[in-house]
Image: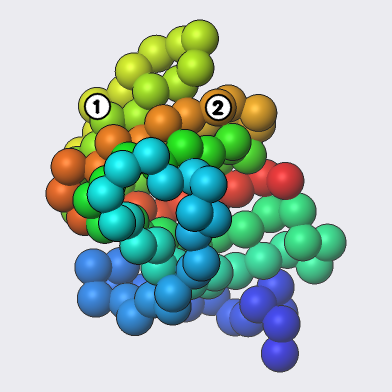
């Protein structure tokens, strides 16, 4: 069964088991951050993803997709090149735009639930 065929479900995000996601060494600015995650749902065309993502402390760069996420735990500063610097923590909702170039300074292991549009 593919994830877009799943019936409705609930997941307790703080306890969800995540899988290692390789982080491109070129993205690491400092520290030894590690990324884990889990896709909970994917649309049939693969253009919509919903899931959980986590990163340990460190500084990394990224180029974003259209994304809405809610921080479940942890803290980070997300600097958007040419834009705002976002201080995010538990309970914060954040919207990133496709093409945003970001630098994430992760102060405490951050876990988020996300919806991405590709």
Crowd band around label 1 with a 10 angstrom C-alpha radius: few (<14), some (14–19), many (20+): few
Q: Are marks 2 and 1 in contact (CB under 8 Å)?
A: no
State the residue at coordinates (32%, 76%): 16
Q: Quadrant of residue 109?
A: bottom left
**Element carrying mark 1:** strand
Q: Quadrant of residue 67?
A: top right
In the image, is residue 118 above or below residue 40?
A: above
Residue 9 is situated, as x and y percent measured from the top left of the image, at 47, 77
Where the N terminus falls, by quadrant?
bottom right
Q: Nearer the viewer, mark 2 or mark 1?
A: 2
Question: Relative to 4, is 101 on the left or the right?
Answer: left
Residue 20 is situated, as x and y percent measured from the top left of the image, at 44, 74
Q: Quadrant of residue 50?
A: bottom right
Q: Which residue is mark 2?
A: 101
Question: Relative to 104, is 96 on the left or the right?
Answer: right
Depth check, front residue: 26 or 92: 26
Q: Which residue is mark 1?
A: 87
State the residue at coordinates (49%, 17%): 81
In the image, is residue 21 above or below residue 7?
A: above
């Amino acid at each position: 069964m593919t994830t877009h065929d799943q019936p409705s479900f609930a997941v307790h995000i703080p306890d969800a088991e995540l899988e290692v996601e390789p982080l491109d060494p070129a993205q690491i600015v400092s520290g030894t951050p590690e990324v884990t995650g889990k896709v909970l749902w994917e649309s049939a065309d693969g253009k919509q993803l919903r899931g959980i993502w986590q990163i340990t402390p460190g500084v990394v760069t990224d180029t974003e997709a259209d994304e809405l996420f809610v921080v479940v735990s942890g803290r980070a500063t997300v600097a958007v090149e040419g834009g705002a610097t976002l201080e995010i923590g538990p309970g914060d909702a954040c919207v990133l735009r496709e093409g945003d170039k970001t630098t994430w300074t992760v102060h405490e292991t951050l876990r988020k639930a996300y919806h991405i549009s590709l």
